[in-house]
Amino acid sequence: DHPVGYLNVYMDSQIFKSCQADGIRTLLTGHDGDTTVTYGYQEFEQLAKRLRLVRMLREARAMNANIPSRAHTLKRLAWHQGVKPAIPTALVAAWRTARFWKKSVVNTSTISHPLHLSSVNPAFRTREYLVQRMETLWEENYPRNLSPAEHHWNSLTTGLFSNMHEQVEKLSAAFGVEPRHPFFDRRLIEFCVSLPPGQRIYKGWTRSIFRFAMEGILPPEVQWRTDKANLGAHIKLNLLKYGRDDIETAINEDSWKIAKYLDIEQLRAAYKEFTSDANRKDSEALLLLTSMYLIKWLDHSGFADKAQTAASAGVGLSA
């Protein structure tokens, strides 16, 4: 009765179904243990602020060797995660002021945005100040100069997790199962938030306290794993198997319903990318799902009919 909230929902559904068949009434989950323990990337910023640059570079090099990826290059860890966020707020404000005075010579149409913003109709994005509003929202939730503990606490107290738990509760209730989430025990959260420096990242390992605590409990290949499976593969493939007609309708004959809000050409390009290799296109999958959700919501709420009536009468419908 509501849109899919997370791409691996099918796994929970099958688990709850199996619990029902086996007469299991209560289930302990492992939801978001990573967030409770935290990856610890804010440690780089704290090391830079304390001018412990040698330690910061040593951890960055070790992480690049232990967990090689585009997110773990030396430049990204040492500069983007470390030095850059440690720059005093006054200097950042002065830089932004200088950029403001140069706005008149900046062609905003050439500025690149994340896929979820570049797919928004440029006129709508500009009129509603979406980029500025998102930046403001981010700064309100994650202001500069937060300690790792403060950042950790903020990440745990957003509405994301209460929303996730509500969805899991609805899903499990359909099978008569009560899920419980040990990683969200307040005592464990308070312990993890209060961890001193060096317990979140150590010798280039994220979630280091968790890894070392699992010595002799988990197999080494699990204890020191550097990645995890793509849990959204199933729904992405099924999106093409069962949702292809809906997607093609959304970006073609029904595209007028969402053209005011989304860039239709971007949607069509995303669909082309998605069909070329669905399993590797997370952003495109979410964008296409969002476009279908938007059309169905506009239809359900009656806004689509109002827009069509206004367009026929030559009257623009306000946002």
Image (cartoon, rainbow, N blue to C red):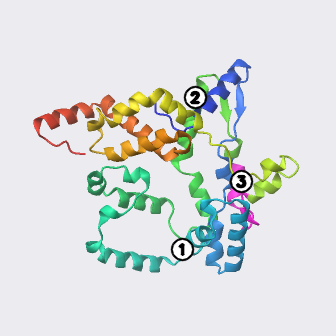
Label 3 with label 1: CB-CB less than 8 Å: no
Q: Which mark is residue 246?
A: none
Label 1 with label 2: CB-CB less than 8 Å: no
Residue 263 appears left or right of 276: left
Query: Along the polypeptide, which appears first: circle 1 or circle 2?
Result: 1
Numbered marks: total: 3
Name the one closer to the observer, 220 or 196: 220
Residue 153 versus residue 228 in the image, above or below: below
Mark 3 burial class by Cα count in 10 Å: few <14, some 14-19, many 20+: few
How far across and down, in percent of the image, does residue 244 sit? 43, 30
Residue at x-position 56% and y-position 57%: 154
Query: Along the polypeptide, which appears first: circle 2 or circle 3?
Result: 2
Q: According to the image, label 3 marks what residue?
A: 226
Q: What segment is highlighted magenta in the picture?
A: 185-207
When asked about the image quadrant of residue 161, the answer is top right
Query: What separation in Å lies between label 2 and label 3 (alpha carbons)?
Result: 30 Å
Q: Secondary structure at mark 2?
A: helix
Name the one closer to the observer, 132 or 179: 132
How far across and down, in percent of the image, does residue 74 sit? 63, 70
Q: According to the image, label 2 marks what residue?
A: 171
Residue type, mark 3 in image: Thr
Mark 2 burial class by Cα count in 10 Å: few <14, some 14-19, many 20+: some
